[in-house]
Image (cartoon, helix red, strand yellow):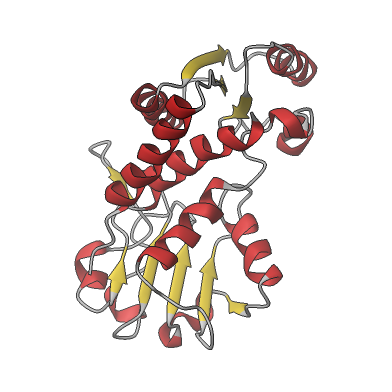
């Protein structure tokens, strides 16, 4: 079965929109983008569109690649200090010259729109929506990046769920991948009936969004699978906006 991320995201956005209208809230999301990365721009556009759908103000602060670490931190402090800004995020990945954690640490908890990882929330909502239990399941988590792998690893650990790396993929009941490596996982690598959550994102030669999973071959064996695009991504954006309600 193909997991319908757009449907889940619309359900979340509908609740956010109702809450904003009912409580007469004025929310604003500020997004900091450094450089001109194609994929990052695509993610920012999705956030902007989602904000427009629910009535949240959106402002993009785009800085050139040449900005220094200290200047970027000062700009973020300045943006976060604006009274009309409910929450702020730094669009990752930052160019390699930056110390990403040092930049992120400048955002205070009361303005951090990612104080709850939107990716973790999205994965939780998928499992809940489709009644997928993780108890007594063999879980494989591929990737340990700052955006996807690490938050998910922390979440699994906090819930006392053991998980393994890609070397155990052939016997896994649940496979979660967030590497950004097109075609990393093929159908012959997973067992029949596995649940496959693809959070990878990269662009093929035609600038088309693709995940870590070879969808055609893996979907023939998986009991549930998220497509890219249209899977985890839209839910993640919706969960980010849900976070803004909690910051208000």
Give the total number of marks visible in the rendering.
0
- The image shows residue 227, relative to residue 225, as above or below, that is above
In the displayed structure, does residue 163 sit left or right of residue 193?
Answer: right
In the displayed structure, does residue 174 sit left or right of residue 150?
Answer: left
Where residue 98 appears, as percent x and y from the top left, is: 71, 30
Within the image, what quadrant is residue 115 found in? top right
Of 127 and 78, the residue lying toward us: 127
Within the image, what quadrant is residue 9 found in? top left
Residue 39 visible in the displayed image: no
Of 173 and 93, the residue lying toward us: 173
Q: Residue at x 76, y 17 (%)?
A: 77
- The image shows residue 168, relative to residue 16, as above or below, that is below
In the displayed structure, does residue 78 sit left or right of residue 62?
Answer: right
Question: Which quadrant, please, contains the N terminus?
Answer: bottom left
Where residue 219 appears, as percent x and y from the top left, is: 23, 70
Where residue 39 appears, as percent x and y from the top left, is: 41, 33
In the displayed structure, does residue 233 sit left or right of residue 59?
Answer: left
- The image shows residue 237, relative to residue 36, as above or below, that is below
Question: Which quadrant, please, contains the C terminus?
Answer: top right
- The image shows residue 198, relative to residue 107, as above or below, that is below
Where residue 17 appears, as percent x and y from the top left, is: 40, 31
């Amino acid at each position: 079965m193909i997991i319908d991320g757009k449907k889940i995201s619309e359900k979340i956005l509908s609740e956010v929109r109702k809450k904003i209208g009912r409580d007469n809230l004025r929310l604003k999301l500020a997004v900091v983008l450094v450089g001109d990365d194609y994929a990052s721009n695509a993610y920012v556009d999705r956030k902007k569109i989602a904000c427009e759908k629910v009535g949240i103000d959106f402002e993009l602060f785009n800085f050139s690649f040449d900005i220094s670490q200290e200047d970027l931190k000062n700009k973020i402090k300045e943006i976060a200090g604006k009274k009309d800004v409910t929450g702020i995020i730094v669009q990752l990945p930052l160019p390699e010259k930056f110390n990403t954690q040092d930049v992120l640490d400048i955002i205070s908890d009361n303005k951090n729109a990612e104080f709850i990882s939107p990716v973790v929330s999205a994965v939780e909502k998928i499992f809940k929506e489709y009644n997928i239990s993780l108890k007594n399941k063999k879980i494989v988590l591929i990737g340990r990046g700052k955006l996807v792998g690490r938050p998910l690893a922390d979440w699994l650990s906090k819930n006392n769920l053991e998980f393994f790396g890609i070397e155990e993929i052939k016997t896994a009941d649940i496979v979660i991948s967030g590497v950004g490596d097109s075609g990393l996982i093929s159908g012959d690598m997973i067992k029949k009936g596995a649940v496959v959550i693809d959070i990878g994102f990269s662009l093929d030669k035609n600038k088309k969004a693709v995940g870590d999973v070879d969808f055609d071959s893996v979907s023939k064996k998986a009991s549930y699978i998220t497509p890219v695009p249209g899977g985890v991504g839209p839910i993640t954006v919706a969960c980010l906006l849900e976070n803004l309600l909690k910051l208000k």
